[in-house]
Amino acid sequence: MAANHAPGRASAPVRPPRRPDPGSRIRDSGAGKSRSVRALRRSDLADVARIDAFHTGERKEAHWKRVCRELLDTRAKRRIGLAYEAPDRRLLGYLLGEVRAFEFGSEPCGWVLAIGIDPKALHLGVGSALLAEACAQFRRAGAPRVRTMVRRNDVPLLAFFRSNGFTGGPYVQLELNVNSDRSSEEVR
């Protein structure tokens, strides 16, 4: 599951994502304790960068340090930083989100800005558990819908969001390359 989103959009009403089959819940092999979703902490930064690097092929510690600082240092109730932690305290996944109400006159809605799952924990319900908690937090913050953007060719991430109830939303993302020679002629 890729950690960053780009062109292509998915939108869904705020409702709990599908729950993984109880038989597929991640369990600690020793104690049988379920892993849990908790608030993201500064100490998670290295794991967030590691998971993101696996999915994107790039190490971006400075980027994640800035993102986590903005998220964690701000007391804004409209921002969400979640971590999925194993009983042995390993970070297996993260989700970053925010309630926004300024894009194109849209009503307040939750935005999933980034999600990443440790490659050893893919397809085990980690992403769905993070998304379920994010949706609950968005709902409590007054956001009736959740949106995200996904690259059109990121089939696994699109499948994840669709399997959790996301569908195409009311907006189409457009862009213009301002570095091309034609862009200055096209913009009039």
Image (cartoon, rainbow, N blue to C red):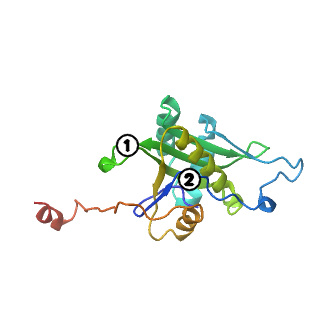
Contact (Cβ within 8 Å) of mark 1 with mark 2: no
Q: Which residue is mark 1?
A: 101
Q: Residues within 10 Å of mark 1 (few under 14, many from 20)?
A: some
Give the distance between the C-alpha atoms of the residues marked 1 and 2, in whole angstroms: 21 Å
User: How far across and down, in percent of the image, does residue 138 sit?
Assistant: 53, 43
Q: Secondary structure at mark 1?
A: loop
Give whichever of 136, 97 is nearer the camera.
Answer: 136
Q: Relative to residue 159, is residue 22 depicted above or below?
A: above
Q: Relative to residue 114, is residue 165 depicted above or below?
A: below
Q: Which residue is mark 2?
A: 115
Q: As drawn, is 124 to the left or to the right of 27?
A: left
Q: Secondary structure at mark 2?
A: strand
- Earlier in the chain: of badge 1 and badge 2, it is 1
Q: As drawn, is 179 to the left or to the right of 94?
A: left
Q: Amino acid at mark 1?
A: Ala
At 77% from the left and 55% from the top, the residue drawn is: 26
User: How far across and down, in percent of the image, does residue 140 sit?
Assistant: 55, 38
At 37% from the left and 60% from the top, the residue drawn is: 170
Give whichever of 168, 115 is nearer the camera.
Answer: 168
Q: Amino acid at mark 2?
A: Ile
User: How far across and down, in percent of the image, does residue 62 sit?
Assistant: 48, 43
